[in-house]
Image: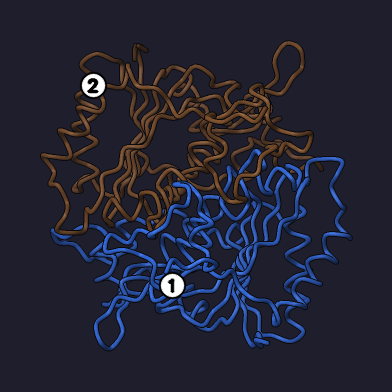
Chain colours: A blue, B brown
Amino acid sequence: MTDIASALWLSAHPTDRSLNGALRAAGVAHLSRDSAVATSDLYAMGWQAALTEDDLGGVGGDQTFGTRTREAHLAGTLAPDIRTEQAKLREADLLVLQFPLWWGGMPAILKGWFDRVFVNGFAFNVTNAAGRTLKYGEGGLEGKRALVVVTAGDRAPSFAAGGVNGHLEALLFPLLHGILWYTGIQPLHPHLIAATDRREFGGLNHERDRLLTRLDGLPAEEPIDYRTLRHGGYDRDQRLVTDAAPLDLGIHECVAVPA
Amino acid sequence: MTDIASALWLSAHPTDRSLNGALRAAGVAHLSRDSAVATSDLYAMGWQAALTEDDLGGVGGDQTFGTRTREAHLAGTLAPDIRTEQAKLREADLLVLQFPLWWGGMPAILKGWFDRVFVNGFAFNVTNAAGRTLKYGEGGLEGKRALVVVTAGDRAPSFAAGGVNGHLEALLFPLLHGILWYTGIQPLHPHLIAATDRREFGGLNHERDRLLTRLDGLPAEEPIDYRTLRHGGYDRDQRLVTDAAPLDLGIHECVAVPA
């Protein structure tokens, strides 16, 4: 049982007059009954999607762009909107990421939230007291959990095992494992609202109820059990010692640790 | 052997004073010796990343946002920068997508190129004369090929089979299979420039040579052999009839079609 004292509800749909808008309003209201809920409705905020030179607050020099983002973070010169989002994230026990699945992933405006907010030194390249770099289950954002809520036009089976679009957790692997888990955030299994363009769609009322029920159950949910580096199983090249198929992302789940 | 009469080189790095900038300049110059090469350097262009209401040119009404993007495309009212990119893409036999791997995928500005340019009716929901919807190996962009050129800070083994970051072709599955293959574009195996932040980095000269050699060999390359719907193997729910592991994206490759 994990209490949710505070949450940040991130959403990315061009208009409130949409399924996403209705589900967002219902979800935020519901969660707000027992938790302090901050929101970042990226389209409504006019959020800048692309990380640019101007975001660094004048940190120049000959170093790489990535290194300079780190310097800007440490110097406190990152653009104010970035620092505001970092502060909101720091406060949150739970991160909700709600978006329509566009081309198998996040709309650009939401990807750009991670590009700009999750900078070097804040979300990665963070070390512990002994100087060890923390990543994959450890890091500056450890202790938080995240729920991805995604709408998709296609039917659910096409995002299931063997589905033509790829398994939803495989499509979202770069987000679930590469962003969230990498930075120490525990990803829950994503919540799919499918068939939104089709006659199989369950309808707004049904999907709203299903979402609110999911939210009610979050405290008792177990996150995806990805492998940490401390679980072992990786060789010196950070490759798993396993005979699993080359493209099977499931091997990263902590179910069959090689001896 | 596939001639490259014309190419579009898309790139997305915040500054030309970078490895990406140097490789881009070399690659474009090299390809230009034998092909007509258009470029879209998204940061230099100040490309708008987020698809918005304003992009629709006034197409309103009660329909969903996605449906209205289709109407705007068919009515020719999409924003001029979108129509310009569509025209450049139509002309190209080869699409080169060059970017630094940010959080396991495209920088937001490049994801936004697909969100805005690959609209309903242009890149998907395209039908043939018999009214059949064309997708996964067929579609409005059929006949084109695409090469993804990606730089990454981590070493190559971490993006290989069993690598802790996930196999590069699995990380890029939403792009390679979900965007390119879905719209009829044939994706080539991605070109990885790894360890850019590490002592194992091969150096600019080495990586430039390796990229130009790759470009020279493109006409003879075979694309990734993804499965088409016409190959069969999918049931009525568009799921593969197979015992392959649930998250194994490799099952979509056309190597072992179930009987």
**Nearest-to-viewer mark from 2 and 1:** 1
Name the quadrant containing residue B222: top left
The residue nearer to you, when weighing A153 against B16, is A153
Residue A165 left/right relative to A204: left
Name the quadrant containing residue B132: top right
Residue type at numbered disc 1: Thr
Tell me what residue is drawn at x 64 percent, y 51 percent: A14
Residue B53 in the image: x percent, y percent?
64, 45
Residue B103 seen: no
Label 2: element kind:
helix
Tell me what residue is drawn at x 35 percent, y 11 percent: B1
Residue B51 seen: yes
Q: Which residue is mark 1?
A: A228
Residue A235 left/right relative to A96: left
Residue A254 in the image: x percent, y percent?
52, 68
Name the quadrant containing residue A82: bottom left
Which class describes the residues within 10 Å of circle 1: few (<14), some (14-19), or many (20+)?
many
The subunit letter for the residue under badge 1 reads: A
The residue nearer to you, when weighing B98 against B145, is B145
Label 1: element kind:
loop
Q: Which residue is mark 2?
A: B216
Residue B220 in the image: x percent, y percent?
32, 17
Which class describes the residues within 10 Å of circle 2: few (<14), some (14-19), or many (20+)?
few
Residue B190 in the image: x percent, y percent?
36, 37
The subunit letter for the residue under badge 2 reads: B
**Can you say whether A40 is above or below B211 in the image?**
below
Residue B164 left/right relative to B33: right
Query: What is the residue that sits farthest to the front in this orientation?
Result: A259
Tell me what residue is drawn at x 31 percent, y 37 percent: B191
Which quadrant of the rendered structure holds the N terminus of chain A?
bottom right
